[in-house]
Structures are given as C-alpha cells and as structure tokens.
Image: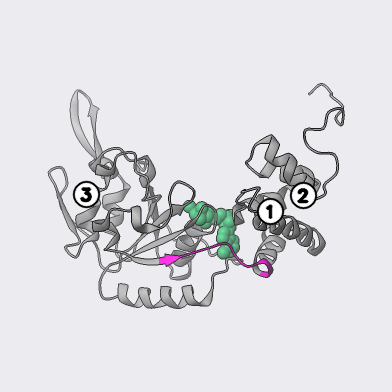
C-alpha cells in the first residue's frame, strides 16, 4: 500500500466531460482561494458512484496540482499511512510511505478515501493533528512533519444504507472540514455524460436513461443506480449488448429483484425464465 519505491506525485488529466453544479463549483473556487492562505480540509459526501472521487481528481487537474489518494477504509492502525519497519540485511529500517511526502509537497491535493470506514477508528488518530490548525505531527521515526503551504485535504465519505449523513463521523474530525454534498446528476446531464463517455447514440442513451429513471423512482425495488452504474450500462451497450443484457450484468441485485425490474421495464423474457437460453461449450 502506497509504498512504491520511487513514487512521484503527478497532476491528473482533466476529464473533459465532468459536470458539477455551479453552486458546488463556486464553493470550490472560494475554498481554493482560502487554501492560498492556509491549508484547507474539504469533506465530500454523497452516495456511492455519484462522482466524489472524480470531483477531487478534477479539482487537482483543473488547478494543476499533484494528487495523492489514500484508502482510509483499509487502515487498521494510526501510523500505517506514514511508513513501516522493514528488515534489510538483518537490520530494521523505517521505510517512509507516500503520505509523509505528500504532506510536505506544496499545493498537493491529498485525498483521504472512505474516511467513514477505517477498520479501526483509532487509525484516524494521527490525522487529527495534521488536519487541525497545528498542521503538524511528531513521529519518532520521521521527526516533526509539517503540512506544506497550499495543501488541500479532501476526504470522501460514502452515504448509503449503513451510513447516512456526516453525523456519524467523529465530531472532532468532522469539525475540521468544509462539507460539500453531492448527488447523482440530473437526467439531461447524465445523458450528456453517457453519450460522451460511453460513446453510444442519443437513442441508446435515451433508452438507458428511461430505464434508470424507472428504477430510481420505484422505491419498492430499492435499487440504487449510480452514475458509475449508468456508465457501465452504457459501455456494455456500446459493445453491442441489449438493454436487458446490460441491466442484468450491471445492476448488483438479487435474481428476484432483477426479475421484477425487467418486468417493470417491460423487457421481455425475464432473466429467470427457463428454456430461453441455448447452452454451448465455452
Ligand atoms: N458529475 C460527473 N460527471 C461526469 N462523470 C461522472 C460524474 N460523476 C461520476 N462520474 C463518473 O462515474 C464514475 C464513478 O464516479 P466516482 O467519482 O468514482 O464516484 P464515487 O467516488 O462517488 O464513488 C466515474 O467513472 C466518473 O467518471
Ligand atoms: Mg470514490
């Protein structure tokens, strides 16, 4: 994890078809201004696949800043982001990871992914002082680490069935962030993204958006269709799949729910229907 020997921090490429509402963009511009005076922390919350990671990447790309992303969701102990002890020629050495380097890189965008679910909540302890006004942390192994000027911390947080809102995040941590709430794109914009990113026709995009709308508005089915899923559907349709095949392979749901979905969408030959497939050797 993050331990590439010659890891370098790079500026990501701009996504020419990334859309966000003007309110969000205005706020991000203001936060960017503040970051020129002192480091800023921004929490991006929203449902799975709504574009949280993408907006962080796009922010770095547009402002020409290096991006470093760290999976907080898999952390189990406080020092884990910083480095580890390794044994070389019978001697123990402390090997520094990418995180301390990112902290000390001016203007670096540091993305803490899935901050709501570290395996062990104590794993966040060392982040507290870095995100506080002190902007520094002391480590026996590395000495005093100070956050470089212009650094912006973005934390992303998945809201879903098991996690609603930012209130479950440790208040001491939450207090240190500006919050940006995201949601799925409106239909016309999502269609634009679909046509341009999945390379499908306007008619195909319309059919997909229609189906997705039916699913999103049917609460009994309770399937969430994220922007990511919509793009997956689009890509497999672009590769020649029928809408039914695309839905069947892209929606992560039970066979029963899938059957109801296909019925609701009037897609003929339900997934569970027997006898509708010929079996061949693979
Ligand atoms: N607003 C958007 N404009 C264009 N593409 C988007 C947008 N939101 C999401 N996507 C696309 O959907 C996919 C999932 O987005 P991602 O940022 O990984 O979601 P999250 O981090 O919220 O789970 C990516 O391929 C991304 O390019
Ligand atoms: Mg993400």
- For marks 2 and 3, give the CA distance: 50 Å
Q: Residue at x 37, y 58 (%)?
A: 166
Q: Which element type, helix, strand or loop, lies under badge 3?
A: helix
Where residue 188 sits, quadrant-wise, is bottom right
Q: Residue at x 27, y 63 (%)?
A: 176
Where residue 165 sits, quadrant-wise, is bottom left
Answer with mark 1 or mark 3, whichever residue precedes in sequence.
Answer: 3
Report the disc number at residue 264: 2
Residue 152 position in % (x across, y down): 33, 64
Q: Residue at x 84, y 23 (%)?
A: 280
Quarter of the rendering occupied by the C terminus: top right
Residue 19 position in % (x across, y down): 57, 68
Residue to which mark 1 is pinned: 215
| Residue range of the region highlighted in magenta in the rendering | 180-188
**Which callout, 2 or 3, points to the residue nearer the camera?**
2
Q: Which element type, helix, strand or loop, lies under badge 1?
A: helix
Answer with mark 2 or mark 3, whichever residue precedes in sequence.
Answer: 3
Asked if marks 2 and 1 touch (Cβ < 8 Å), the reply is yes
Label 2 crowd bin: few (<14), some (14–19), many (20+), radius 10 Å: some
């Amino acid at each position: 994890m993050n331990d590439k020997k010659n890891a370098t921090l790079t500026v990501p490429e701009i996504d020419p078809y990334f859309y966000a509402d003007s309110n969000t963009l205005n706020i991000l511009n203001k936060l960017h201004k503040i970051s020129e005076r002192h480091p800023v922390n921004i929490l991006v919350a929203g449902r799975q696949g709504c574009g949280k990671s993408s907006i962080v990447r796009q922010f770095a790309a547009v402002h020409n800043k290096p991006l470093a992303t760290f999976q907080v969701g898999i952390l189990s102990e406080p020092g884990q982001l910083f480095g580890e002890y390794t044994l070389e020629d019978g001697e123990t050495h402390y090997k520094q990871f990418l995180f301390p380097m990112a902290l000390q890189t001016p203007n670096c965008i540091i993305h803490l992914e899935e901050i709501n679910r570290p395996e062990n909540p104590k794993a966040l302890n060392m982040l507290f002082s870095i995100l506080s006004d002190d902007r520094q942390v002391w480590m026996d192994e590395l000495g005093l680490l100070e956050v470089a000027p212009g650094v912006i911390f973005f934390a992303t947080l998945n809201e879903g069935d098991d996690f609603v809102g930012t209130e479950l995040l440790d208040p001491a941590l939450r207090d240190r962030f500006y919050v940006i709430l995201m949601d799925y794109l409106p239909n016309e914009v999502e269609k634009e993204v679909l046509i341009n990113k999945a390379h499908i026709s306007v008619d195909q995009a319309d059919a997909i958006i229609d189906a997705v709308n039916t699913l999103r508005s049917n609460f009994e089915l309770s399937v969430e269709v994220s922007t990511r899923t919509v793009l997956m559907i689009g890509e497999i349709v672009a590769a020649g799949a029928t809408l039914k095949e695309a839905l069947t392979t892209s929606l992560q749901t039970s066979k029963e729910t899938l059957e109801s979905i296909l019925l609701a969408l009037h897609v003929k030959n339900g997934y569970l229907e027997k006898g509708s497939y010929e079996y061949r050797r693979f």
